[in-house]
Amino acid sequence: MRLAALGIFLAGCLFSSGWVRAETITIATGEFPPWTTEKEKHGGFVNRVVAEAFARAGIRVNFVYLPWKRVEAETRLGRYAASSFWFTGPEADFLASDPISSHRELFFHLRERPLPKWQTLADLRGLNFGATLGYTYTREFWKMARTGKIKVEVASHDELNFKKVLAGRIDAFPMEEVSGWMLLSNPEVFPPGTRKLFVTDQRPLRLTEGHLRFPRRLAGSAALAARFNAGLAGMRKDGTYDRYLQDLAKQANPWPGSP
């Protein structure tokens, strides 16, 4: 009798805690600290939000870290439930979540080599820019690159693009503001003082928001997106989202802005 009672008690605990009912999904993601990163306890701000929002819907998330090009391609094929995260909204092959984060994508360049004053990218005609493989940037940016109005060299990593700026091989590199300053301030990547050599052009290439993307080819994507959005809304309502933002600010300080 005691063993039977213990079994019933344990089963009740499992059920009430959600262990029995919990679903598990796999989300493809990549390295883009402090927003998504395998090196931090919570996987970066965005992945922390994603995990919590889904947990509120009774869903556990397993993150798989891949190069961004593979993240996009394999999620499009439906090999993952979603990908985290992107500066683009709904597309032909993807549904997009409600906004998770807000961003400014700025041109980083050497302090001693300022960019000309500009209103549109056409004003930067003839300059040489860096880009990172798998990043989206803007349609105008890529159109001008294809037509030769600006020159764009694609590198495999952000670090390589910053090194190209330092070497004078490119004039500027557009990158998300917080991520850019954190990378330049990382003593494991760049020598101390490197950050002081750079400034950002305060006219952004774009103001954008981060989203989860769900593959349209998976039948359950719309329902999964709705469950995520509900969890995210709950986080914003009860203050959890703001608390995560405060944690991010402490981690990424000092940011944003030039040194």
Image (cartoon, rainbow, N blue to C red):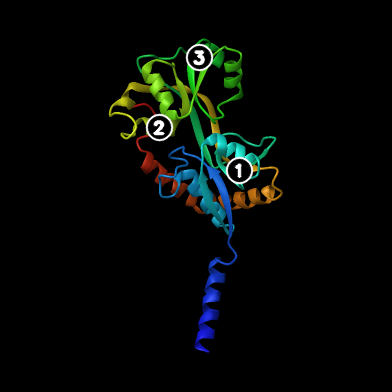
Marks 2 and 3: in contact by CB < 8 Å? no
Q: Find residue 145 and report its horizontal and vertical position in percent.
A: 57, 17
Question: For this view, does 109 lie left or right of residue 63?
Answer: left
Q: Kindly identify the amino acid type of the residue bearing the numbered disc 2.
A: Pro
Q: Find residue 48 and report its horizontal and vertical position in percent.
A: 48, 49
Picture residue at 39% right of the left edge, 41% below the top: 249
Q: Quadrant of the C terminus?
A: top left
State the residue lying farthest toward the left.
192
The first of marks 3 and 1 along the sequence is 1
Q: Which residue is mark 3?
A: 118
Q: Which residue is mark 1?
A: 98
> Mark 3 to mark 1: distance in Å?
32 Å
> Mark 3 to mark 2: distance in Å?
21 Å
State the residue lying farthest toward the top.
126
The first of marks 3 and 2 along the sequence is 3
Where residue 96 sits, quadrant-wise, is: top right
Q: Tell which of 82 and 108 is nearer to you.
A: 82
> Mark 2 to mark 1: distance in Å?
24 Å
Q: Is residue 252 above or below residue 137?
A: below
Picture residue at 57% right of the left edge, 20% below the top: 141
Q: Is residue 90 above or below residue 9?
A: above
Q: Secondary structure at mark 2?
A: loop
The first of marks 2 and 1 along the sequence is 1
Q: Find residue 245 and report its horizontal and vertical position in percent.
A: 44, 44
Q: Which residue is mark 2?
A: 256
Q: Kindly identify the amino acid type of the residue bearing the numbered disc 3.
A: Trp
